[in-house]
Amino acid sequence: MARHLKVAVQMDPIDSININADSTFALMREAQKRAHKLWHYEVRHMSLREGVVRQGIRREERLSARAHPVTVRPQHGAHYQFGEMATLDLASMDVVLMRQDPPFDMAYITATHLLEHIHPRTLVVNDPASVRNAPEKLLVTHFPDLMPPTLVTWDLEAIRAFRLEHEDIIVKPLFGNGGAGVFRIKRDDENLAALLEMHFARSREPLMFQRYEPAVRKGDKRIVLVDGAPMGVVNRVPAEGEARSNMHVGGRPEKCTLTARDREICAAIGPTLRQQGLIFVGIDVIGDWLTEINVTSPTGIQEIDRFDGINIEAAIWDSIEAKLGT
């Protein structure tokens, strides 16, 4: 008989999620079906206490969170029920799902450092060190043969040269999410200099620049991989007059299938994802090109489930349970 697991879900406030699209909600429902016990907490409720030395014996640091026991159900406006909040020793959990959304800022990075105090004795999904070392717009740069022409830089001369070479380009913040702050700069667009001035006046971070791929008008595919293996795909078609295909900004999900090129991309990156403990990953593919590898809080499983009649959340839990030997 499978062991019933204790699962802490580290996420954003649960009251505001869209239960018809949220991947974390789907994961929680599947865990509940398997009789795993769930707790919910936000990053701001985590604490790490120092080790204590008594009679020459040092106790390990204690990572805790003020958390609610939680049950979920597919009912709008009443999709969760909390038990009484209490301090939860995260090392006593079998699994922690790290599912808070970016931005991938110092708060996010700090959370990965804290979770390393319990991983892998408590399985953190995805591996916190790998998440920290593989922000989605940078992990992809380790696969240059799979990606479109790309530049990551602060240097204005390098940016001008890239724009001169490719003319029609996409400008992305490195550590955002949901399409926020993504711009298309066409050949005759006079706003690039102002955009760069605004960004670098507010941030010390570099920007990513990629050649614009006209194939995006036909859609930007989200492919979900579980333990490095492709499980399903959904196409996201940008709204009229919009360069971004993210569903957060009006992208329309459509049914599609994996192409030979999609499978080639997955086969190339799959071993790296498995080696790094990245169980649940969503990649973005435009035409023949891999543009992002999303490891922080991937989405898309509910849309794929509906189109293809599969259950990706079950595959994720099968992988987690196999790693725990349950």
Image: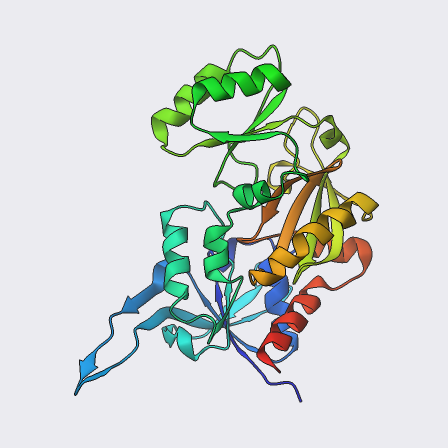
- What residue is shown at x 36% (from left), y 33% (from top)? 204
Where is the C terminus found, in terms of image quarters? Answer: bottom right
What percent of the width, then of the height, locates residue 321? 62, 76
Left or right: 112 as drawn, with respect to 226: left
Residue 154 drawn above or below residue 17: above
| Residue 22 placement: quadrant | bottom right
Whether residue 192 is visible = yes
What percent of the width, then of the height, locates residue 45? 35, 63
Residue in the foreground of this view, choosing between 150 and 117:
150
Left or right: 168 as drawn, with respect to 107: right
Residue in the foreground of this view, choosing between 142 and 195:
142
Residue 301 drawn above or below residue 326: above
Left or right: 302 as drawn, with respect to 59: right
What percent of the width, then of the height, locates residue 156? 44, 19
- What residue is shown at x 40% (from left), y 52% (from top)? 109
Where is the N terminus found, in terms of image quarters? Answer: bottom right
- What residue is shown at x 50% (from left), y 21% (from top)? 159
The number of callouts visible is 0
Residue 106 drawn above or below residue 305: above
Whether residue 280 is visible = no
Residue 238 drawn above or below residue 308: above
Left or right: 145 as drawn, with respect to 123: right
What percent of the width, then of the height, locates residue 29? 63, 68
Residue in the foreground of this view, choosing between 57 and 24:
57
- What residue is shown at x 58% (from left), y 49% (from top)? 294
Residue in the foreground of this view, choosing between 150 and 75:
150
* Colouring chosen for the image of the structure: rainbow
| Residue 64 placement: quadrant | bottom left
